[in-house]
Amino acid sequence: MGVGGVFIETKKTLPMDATVELNFLVEDGGIVAKAAVRYVLPGVGVGLQFKNVRTEDQPYFAAMIKRIIPAN
């Protein structure tokens, strides 16, 4: 996971450019984001690029990313 997107392991095949809704449960609550399928590795997973995060979830999303990717 990074600021721009995430790789999800799944056996489900999704079409390129499809939009998916992601729901994250973090210590701050729930986060809902939309992402576009940018990479497909059949039988392994998909690379997703974040498109938008609900306005009310943006501070929680930023805090989640800071916890996952510490500043150097």
Image: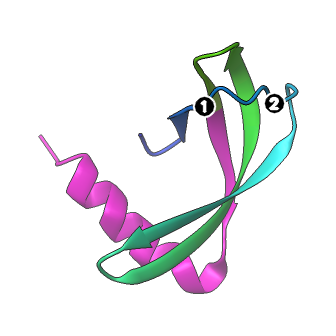
Compared with residue 42, is residue 33 higher up or lower down, i.e. above or below?
below
Is residue 50 highlighted in magenta?
Answer: yes
Q: Residue at x 87, y 38 (%)?
A: 18
Scheme of colours in the image: rainbow
The numbered dot on residue 53 is: none
Q: Amino acid at mark 2?
A: Leu
Compared with residue 65, is residue 7 higher up or lower down, i.e. above or below?
above
Residue lying furthest top? 42
Compared with residue 60, is residue 14 higher up or lower down, i.e. above or below?
above
Few, some or many residues within 10 Å of mark 1 (<14, 14–19, 20+): few
Q: In which image quadrant can residue 13 be found?
A: top right
Looking at the rendered image, the quarter that the N terminus falls into is top left
Q: In which image quadrant can residue 37 be found?
A: top right
Disc 2, SS: loop
Residue at which label 2 appears: 14
Disc 1, SS: loop
Residue 72 location (% of width, % of height): 11, 40
Residue 46 location (% of width, % of height): 64, 27
Compared with residue 71, is residue 45 higher up or lower down, i.e. above or below?
above
Few, some or many residues within 10 Å of mark 2 (<14, 14–19, 20+): some
Residue 23 location (% of width, % of height): 58, 65
Residue at which label 1 appears: 10
- Magenta stretch bounds: 48-72
Residue 17 location (% of width, % of height): 86, 32
Residue lying furthest left? 72
Q: Amino acid at mark 1?
A: Thr
Please indicate whether residue 60 sits to the left or right of residue 66 in the image: right
Q: Residue at x 81, y 30 (%)?
A: 14
Q: Are marks 1 and 2 in contact (CB under 8 Å)?
A: yes
